[in-house]
Amino acid sequence: MSMPAAKGPNEKFCSNRASIISARAEICPKCGVRQLSSSGVFGATTAGGRNRITAAIFALLLGGLGIHKFYLGRVGQGILYLLFCWIFIPTIIGFIEGIIYLTMTDQEFEAKYG
């Protein structure tokens, strides 16, 4: 299923189908699934139980060990980070990824890691 390219300011993506619905909708009119609340201080949690802010904190603080990759379900990448942590390149990459996670919207994070 392909994701729609653009949404308006009063729209959001359905957490089940990734189709565009009204931003105020609590239940998707197309599939009937209750929508995740994207309001909150620490960001929304994806359908997979992952939080954008938590992933960013893991990447910023423990990125050299790949903890954020394990948290996001990317175990193979996490193992690579662990294997090469002694050369500090994964630390730099993890820091950059942490900044990227912080600048993403909850919808972009959900589409990529949900």
Image (spheres, grey):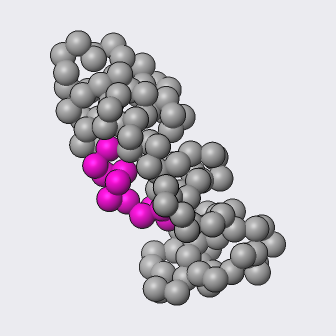
- Residue 24's image quarter? bottom right
Residue 112, percent from left and from top? 48, 53
**Residue ID at (30%, 51%):** 100
- Residue 31's image quarter? bottom right
The part of the chain drawn in magenta is 98-108
Residue 77 vertical position relative to residue 46 in the rendered view, above or below: above
On the rendered structure, is 14 left or right of 78?
right
Residue 20, percent from left and from top? 59, 78
Residue 59 vertical position relative to residue 21 in the rendered view, above or below: above
Residue found at the very far right of the displayed protein: 32
**Residue ID at (33%, 13%):** 83
Residue 69 vertical position relative to residue 24 in the rendered view, above or below: above
* In the foreground, 26 or 11: 26
* In the foreground, 67 or 75: 67
Q: Is residue 102 magenta?
A: yes
Residue 30, percent from left and from top? 76, 78
**Residue ID at (23%, 12%):** 86
* In the foreground, 61 or 82: 61
Q: For the N terminus, which image quadrant?
A: bottom right
Residue 113, percent from left and from top? 51, 49
Type of secondary structure dominating the magenta stretch: helix
Residue 73 vertical position relative to residue 13 in the rendered view, above or below: above
Report if residue 17 is visible in the image.
no
Q: Is residue 95 magenta?
A: no
**Residue ID at (76%, 68%):** 34
- Residue 79's image quarter? top left
Report if residue 47 is visible in the image.
yes
Q: How many marks?
A: 0
Residue found at the very far front of the displayed protein: 41
